[in-house]
Image (cartoon, helix red, strand yellow):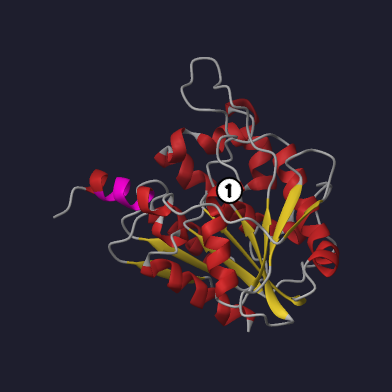
């Protein structure tokens, strides 16, 4: 049996071994340097291709930006999709007092940015990525980005009074969430990403008040077609987190697709060299085409 730590290290090294891929165009959706969307045209030269909006992971922490996701979004572009890769404000580079990792997320800026970006993408794509068919948008995200994708698709069921609430469901074909931090209660129990969920919400004193506005498992049902792709051997975001979300959805009367990949950890889902990445592309295609 392979050593789990060695497998994780090899998978991460493979995913991060690919050179960054420059976008075909970029556009700002706000004044902050992190409020930007990169656009990738379908490499087959096609027109009116479905638009995949991608949200990167990295535990909502500042050192991890959209650059590490560029090989994955280029992979999708080579599969015939138009792609919009969203950047957003994340936590500080400096750990909290007594901590060892950079702070996870900013409240409310991380959520402000994702909401603003998703609202702006159709108009920005019309200008900067005319090949994109904005009537066929699929939202995807990996890890913390998977959380943000699920959250963005649920804004119409946010509690009344939320500044991010939409009056109607977003115009999405669906969501494909990759190893998402989808159920905050289970993620906190497991200490996912070194307590990143609690940090995202501003600490223990704010968690109970803010979780109903941020936890995808509390924002069900959405009525948006949703699929989760997860590696069974994922130790960064264990599959039980996604399973808890799927169970919550079922209790709310909603079915969530769940593809559990055997022998796969956290990073192959966004690694163009891995078979798991092709599975992700196929799941997106099923919603988009």
Between residues 219 and 72, which one lies in front from this camera angle? Answer: 72
| In this rendering, position of residue 4 left or right of residue 60 | left
Image coordinates for residue 108, horizontal then vertical, percent = 74, 37
Between residues 25 and 96, which one lies in front from this camera angle? Answer: 25
Q: Residue at x 43, y 49 (%)?
A: 16
Q: Which residue is drawn at 46% across and 65% down?
A: 229
Q: In this view, does 64 lie above or below 96?
A: below
Per the image, label 1 sits on a secondary structure element best described as helix
| Quadrant position of residue 23 | bottom right
Q: Is the magenta stretch mostly helix, strand or loop?
A: helix
Q: What stretch is highlighted in magenta?
A: 7-12
Find disc 1 in the rendering and name its residue.
67
| In this rendering, position of residue 13 left or right of residue 176 | left
Image coordinates for residue 260, horizontal then vertical, percent = 38, 67
Q: Is the residue marked by circle 1 packed among few (<14), some (14-19), or many (20+) residues within 10 Å?
A: some
Looking at the rendering, in which quadrant would you find the N terminus?
A: bottom left
Between residues 14 and 44, which one lies in front from this camera angle? Answer: 44
């Amino acid at each position: 049996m392979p050593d789990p730590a060695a497998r994780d290290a090899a998978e991460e090294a493979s995913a991060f071994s690919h050179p960054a891929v420059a976008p075909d165009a970029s556009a700002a959706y706000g004044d902050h340097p992190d409020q930007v969307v990169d656009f990738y045209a379908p490499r087959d030269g096609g027109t009116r291709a479905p638009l995949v909006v991608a949200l990167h992971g990295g535990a909502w922490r500042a050192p991890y930006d959209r650059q590490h996701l560029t090989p994955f979004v280029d992979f999708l572009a080579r599969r015939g999709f138009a792609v919009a890769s969203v950047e957003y404000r994340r936590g500080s580079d400096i750990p909290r007092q007594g901590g060892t990792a950079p702070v996870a997320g900013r409240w409310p800026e991380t959520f402000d940015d994702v909401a603003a970006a998703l609202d702006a993408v159709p108009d920005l794509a019309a200008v900067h990525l005319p090949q994109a068919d904005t009537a066929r948008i699929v939202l995807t995200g990996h890890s913390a980005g998977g959380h943000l994708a699920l959250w963005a698709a649920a804004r119409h069921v946010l509690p009344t009074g939320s500044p991010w609430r939409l009056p109607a469901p977003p115009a999405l074909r669906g969501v494909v969430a990759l190893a998402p931090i989808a159920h905050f209660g289970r993620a906190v129990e497991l200490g996912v990403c070194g307590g990143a969920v609690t940090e995202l919400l501003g600490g223990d004193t704010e968690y109970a008040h803010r979780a109903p506005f941020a936890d995808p498992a509390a924002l069900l049902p959405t009525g948006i077609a949703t699929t989760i792709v997860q590696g069974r051997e994922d130790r960064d975001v264990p599959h039980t987190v996604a399973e808890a979300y799927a169970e919550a959805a079922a209790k709310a009367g909603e079915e969530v697709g769940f593809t559990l990949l055997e022998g796969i950890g956290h990073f192959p889902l966004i690694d163009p060299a891995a078979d798991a990445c092709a599975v992700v592309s196929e799941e997106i295609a099923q919603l988009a085409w």
